[in-house]
Image: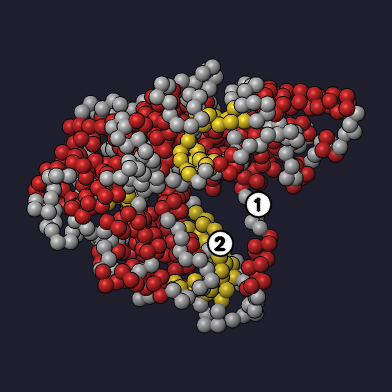
C-alpha cells in the first residue's frame, strides 16, 4: 500500500461492486434501512432516470474507507447505502431469467461485501446472492431461519415487492433501470490515510458536526438578495427560522406583540395579504418597543443594531422574541415532513398554483417530446429549483418568503401532526390560539374541544374524519419526498384561506375527491394521470371513478400489480367510516405504517391444500400488515390466523388498538363460523373471498 493517500474518486455501481472487497467492521451498527429509506432511494433513482435526459448521473454521497493489510477496505462511513446498493443489485441479478437479462455483469462467484464477526449478516447476503434461500427469500426453510439476519432479508423483500411496480408506474423497464443503476449512480469513495488513528478520526468527525445543508446554503442566497436592507434581512431571517422548526407552530416564532399583528388578537388567523404587510408589522413593533424604551429610559443594546448577513447566519438568536410565550409544542408534536421537503412543497404550490410556469415551459429543447416536467418534490433538487425560479430578484424572494409564512400557518392548522402527550401518542389536527393573558392552548381545528370528540358538535365529527383521511395518505407515503397529497392539500388551502371561516365540510369533500382521483385516475387507471394534472388541472375532481363495482378495473388490485399502498389505507378509512366512524365499531382504530402486502390464505400453507394462483392473488385474499406481523403469521393456515385475530383484536376491550388492517379484520369476520376445523374446503374459502372483494370494492365506488 502506497504512503500517498489516493485522491477521492467517483465510482459507478458496476465498478464499486466488482473491483475491490469491502468489510463492515463490528463496531458499525447493524443494517437498519427499511421501507422509508429504501423506497426513497428507488424513487430518487427513478426520478433522475426518467425525468432527466437519461444520461444525468445520480450522486448518492460518499463512502469513507480504510485499506487493510490484506487489501480489502474497511467501511468507516456509508455502510447503510453500500449494503442497500448490494441488495438492489442482487435483486436485479436474480431477475436474469428472461431472454434479455437485466443485469449480466454481476455474475461473479462471490460477493465483495462481508460483515466482520456477524455470520448471520454475511450468510444472509451470500444466500440471497446465490439464490439458496427457497423462492429467492420469499419463504425461508425452517432449518435456516436461525441463520438469517432479518433486517437484511426485509431490505431485499422491500425491493422485491416494490421495485417492479414503481418501474412500471414510471413507464420504464427493469432493464433500463438496471442499466441506469449500473452506470449512472455515482458514489464518491474517500480513503483515509495509511496509519490513521481511527479512534481520533471518529472523534474529529463527531466534533466538527455536519457540513452546511442545502437549505442553509439557500438561506444565505435569499438573504444576499436583500443584503443592503437590514430591515428586510431581519424579516426574512425571522420567518425562515420560524418555519424551519417544523415541530413548532409558526406563531411561536414571533413575540406576542408581533403575533397579534400577524395572526390576530386570538393568534388563530392569518391577517396579511403580502410581504409589505409583514414588513409593516415589524416596523410598527420596533417603533412601539423604541417608544417603550424611551419612556423607561432604557439604553439601547447591541441587539437593536442592524446585523450583517454573516452575523445573521452565525447567530442562534431570534429577532424580537424577548417576551415570546414559546409553549411546549417542540416536545409535544412531530411533523409529517421535514423542512427541506416542505420548502419543495411550498415552491411547487407557489409556482404551479399561481400558474407562473406551465409544465411544458420547464422543459429544455431536447425534452420537448417527453413527459411534462414539474417542480420536483425532491429536496436534492432544492438549490437547482430555487436558482431557476426564486433567486432572480429581491421582489421574487420577498414574495416567496410571504408565501412560505402563509403555507406554514395553513400547514400547522390544517395538516395532521403526531402528538406525544402523557405517555400516549395519536394523530391530531389542532389550532394554536391565545387562551388567557399571553399563554396559548391547542384546540381541535374544527370545533372547540380540547379533548375527546363532542357528540353534539358536527364540526368535531369532521375534525376526526379529516384526521383519519389525512393519516391514510401519510402512512401510504412515509418518505419525506413525493407527498403529492400534501401538495394537493396545500394548493387547495392557499386558494381558500382568504375565506373568513374555512368550512370543514368543504375541506373534507375536497380531500375525499383527491383520494378518489388518486385511486381511479392513477393507481387503478390503465393510462395514469400525472399528479400535476390531478391537482392543478382537474382540481382533484376524479375523472375515472366508475358508477358500479363491475366497471372497476381490478387488474391493478391483484398481488404484484398494486401500485400504491394507499389502496389499502383508503379502504381502511372507508371501512372505519362505514362502520360508524368515531362512534362506531372501529372507533379506536388508528393508522400506522404498514407496508407488507400479504396473502391471507398463504402461498404455501402448512397442512392444507393450496389455492389456484388466480384466487390466491385476488384482492379479496390480500391484506396490508407490518413486516413483524407478517413474520408472526408466516405460512399459518387461515384458521390459525382467524384465531389470532379473534383473540388479539375482536375479543378485547380495546376495540381496535393495534389492528393490522381493517380489511383483514373484515375478512376474518366474514369467514368466522363458515371456515372451521371441520370445514376447510378451498372452494368455500374461494367463494367467501370473492364476496369479500365485492363488498370492499363497493366501498370505493359508493359515496360516503
Q: Nearer the viewer, residue 57 or 600?
A: 600
Q: Is residue 619 left or right of residue 402?
A: left
Residue 193 rendering spot, x and y as whole percentages: 64, 74
Q: Is residue 353 left or right of residue 661?
A: right
- For disc 1, the marked residue is 212
Q: How is the image coloured?
A: secondary structure
Is residue 350 visible to us here?
no
Residue 328 rendering spot, x and y as whole percentages: 61, 40
- The label nearer to you, 1 versus 2, is 1
Residue 675 rendering spot, x and y as whole percentages: 13, 48
Task: Mark 1 and mark 2 in contact? Answer it, CB < 8 Å.
Answer: no
Q: In which image quadrant can residue 240 be found?
A: top right
Q: Nearer the viewer, residue 22 or 319?
A: 319
- For disc 2, the marked residue is 62
Q: Quadrant of the N terminus?
A: bottom right
Crowding at dot 1, Cα within 10 Å, few <14 / some 14-19 / many 20+, comes out as few
**In what element is the residue under mark 2?**
strand
Q: CA distance from mark 1 to mark 2?
A: 15 Å
Residue at the location (29% across, 71% down)? 144
Residue at the location (65% across, 55% down)? 211
**In what element is the residue under mark 1?**
loop
Residue 260 rendering spot, x and y as whole percentages: 67, 24
Is residue 84 visible to us here?
yes
Looking at the image, tell me whether mark 1 or mark 2 is earlier in sequence order: 2
Residue at the location (88% across, 34% down)? 300
Q: Nearer the viewer, residue 258 or 464?
A: 464
Q: Quadrant of the C terminus?
A: top left
Q: In which image quadrant can residue 344 be found?
A: top right
Residue at the location (39% across, 64% down)? 152
Amino acid at each position: 500500500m502506497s504512503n500517498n493517500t489516493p485522491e477521492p474518486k467517483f465510482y459507478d455501481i458496476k465498478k464499486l461492486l466488482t473491483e475491490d472487497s469491502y468489510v463492515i467492521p463490528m463496531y458499525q451498527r447493524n443494517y437498519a434501512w427499511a421501507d422509508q429509506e429504501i423506497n426513497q432511494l428507488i424513487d430518487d433513482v427513478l426520478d433522475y432516470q426518467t425525468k432527466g435526459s437519461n444520461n444525468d448521473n445520480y450522486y448518492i454521497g460518499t463512502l469513507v474507507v480504510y485499506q487493510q493489510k490484506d487489501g480489502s477496505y474497511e467501511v468507516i462511513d456509508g455502510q447503510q447505502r453500500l449494503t442497500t446498493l448490494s441488495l438492489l443489485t442482487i435483486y436485479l441479478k436474480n431477475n436474469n431469467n428472461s431472454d434479455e437479462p437485466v443485469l449480466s455483469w454481476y455474475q461473479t462467484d462471490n460477493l465483495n461485501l462481508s460483515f466482520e464477526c456477524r455470520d448471520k449478516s454475511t450468510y444472509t447476503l451470500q444466500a440471497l446472492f446465490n439464490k439458496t434461500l427457497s423462492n429467492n427469500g420469499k419463504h425461508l426453510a425452517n432449518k435456516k431461519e436461525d441463520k438469517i439476519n432479518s433486517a437484511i432479508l426485509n431490505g431485499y423483500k422491500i425491493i422485491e415487492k416494490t421495485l417492479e411496480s414503481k418501474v412500471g408506474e414510471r413507464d420504464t423497464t427493469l432493464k433500463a433501470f438496471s442499466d441506469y443503476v449500473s452506470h449512472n449512480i455515482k458514489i464518491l469513495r474517500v480513503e483515509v490515510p495509511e496509519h490513521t488513528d481511527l479512534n481520533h478520526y471518529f472523534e474529529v468527525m463527531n466534533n466538527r458536526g455536519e457540513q452546511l445543508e442545502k437549505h442553509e446554503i439557500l438561506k444565505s442566497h435569499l438573504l444576499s438578495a436583500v443584503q443592503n436592507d437590514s430591515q428586510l434581512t431581519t424579516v426574512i431571517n425571522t420567518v425562515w427560522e420560524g418555519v424551519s422548526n417544523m415541530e413548532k407552530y409558526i406563531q411561536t416564532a414571533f413575540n406576542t406583540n408581533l403575533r397579534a399583528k400577524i395572526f390576530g388578537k386570538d393568534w388563530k388567523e392569518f391577517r396579511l395579504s403580502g410581504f409589505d404587510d409583514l414588513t409593516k408589522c415589524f416596523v410598527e413593533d420596533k417603533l412601539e418597543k423604541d417608544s417603550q424604551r424611551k419612556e423607561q429610559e432604557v439604553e439601547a443594546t447591541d441587539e437593536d443594531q442592524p446585523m450583517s448577513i454573516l452575523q445573521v447566519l452565525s447567530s442562534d438568536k431570534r429577532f424580537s422574541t424577548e417576551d415570546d410565550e414559546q409553549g411546549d409544542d417542540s416536545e409535544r408534536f412531530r411533523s409529517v415532513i421535514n423542512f427541506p421537503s416542505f420548502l419543495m412543497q411550498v415552491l411547487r404550490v407557489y409556482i404551479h398554483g399561481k400558474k407562473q410556469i406551465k409544465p411544458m415551459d420547464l422543459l429544455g429543447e431536447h425534452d420537448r417530446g417527453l413527459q411534462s416536467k414539474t417542480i420536483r418534490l425532491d429536496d436534492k433538487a432544492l438549490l437547482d429549483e430555487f436558482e431557476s425560479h426564486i433567486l432572480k430578484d429581491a421582489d421574487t424572494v420577498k414574495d416567496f418568503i410571504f408565501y412560505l409564512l402563509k403555507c406554514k400557518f395553513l400547514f400547522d392548522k390544517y395538516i395532521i401532526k403526531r402528538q406525544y402527550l402523557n405517555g400516549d401518542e395519536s394523530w391530531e389536527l389542532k389550532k394554536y390560539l391565545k387562551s388567557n393573558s399571553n399563554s396559548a392552548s391547542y384546540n381541535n381545528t374544527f370545533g372547540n374541544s380540547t379533548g375527546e370528540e363532542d357528540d353534539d358538535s358536527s364540526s368535531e365529527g369532521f375534525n376526526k374524519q379529516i384526521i383519519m383521511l389525512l393519516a391514510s395518505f401519510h402512512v401510504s407515503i412515509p418518505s419525506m419526498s413525493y407527498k403529492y397529497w400534501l401538495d394537493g392539500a396545500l394548493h387547495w388551502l392557499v386558494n381558500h384561506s382568504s375565506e373568513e371561516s374555512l368550512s370543514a365540510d368543504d375541506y373534507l369533500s375536497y380531500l375525499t375527491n383527491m383520494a378518489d382521483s388518486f385511486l381511479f385516475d392513477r393507481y387503478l387507471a390503465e393510462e395514469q394521470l400525472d399528479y400535476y394534472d390531478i391537482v392543478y388541472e382537474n382540481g382533484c375532481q376524479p375523472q375515472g371513478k366508475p358508477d358500479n363495482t363491475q366497471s372497476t378495473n381490478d387488474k391493478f388490485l391483484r398481488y404484484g400489480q398494486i401500485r400504491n399502498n394507499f389502496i389499502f389505507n383508503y379502504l381502511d378509512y372507508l371501512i372505519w367510516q362505514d362502520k360508524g366512524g368515531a362512534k362506531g365499531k372501529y372507533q379506536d382504530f388508528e393508522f400506522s405504517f404498514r407496508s407488507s402486502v400479504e396473502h391471507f390464505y398463504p402461498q404455501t400453507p402448512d397442512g392444507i391444500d393450496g389455492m389456484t394462483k388466480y384466487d390466491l392473488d385476488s384482492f379479496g385474499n390480500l391484506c396490508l400488515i407490518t413486516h413483524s406481523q407478517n413474520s408472526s403469521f408466516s405460512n399459518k393456515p387461515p384458521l390459525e390466523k382467524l384465531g389470532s385475530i379473534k383473540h388479539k383484536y375482536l375479543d378485547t376491550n380495546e376495540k381496535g388498538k393495534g389492528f393490522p388492517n381493517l380489511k383483514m379484520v373484515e375478512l376474518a369476520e366474514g369467514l368466522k363460523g363458515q371456515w372451521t376445523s371441520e370445514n376447510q374446503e378451498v372452494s368455500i374459502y374461494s367463494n367467501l373471498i370473492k364476496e369479500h372483494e365485492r363488498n370492499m370494492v363497493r366501498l370505493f365506488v359508493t359515496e360516503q
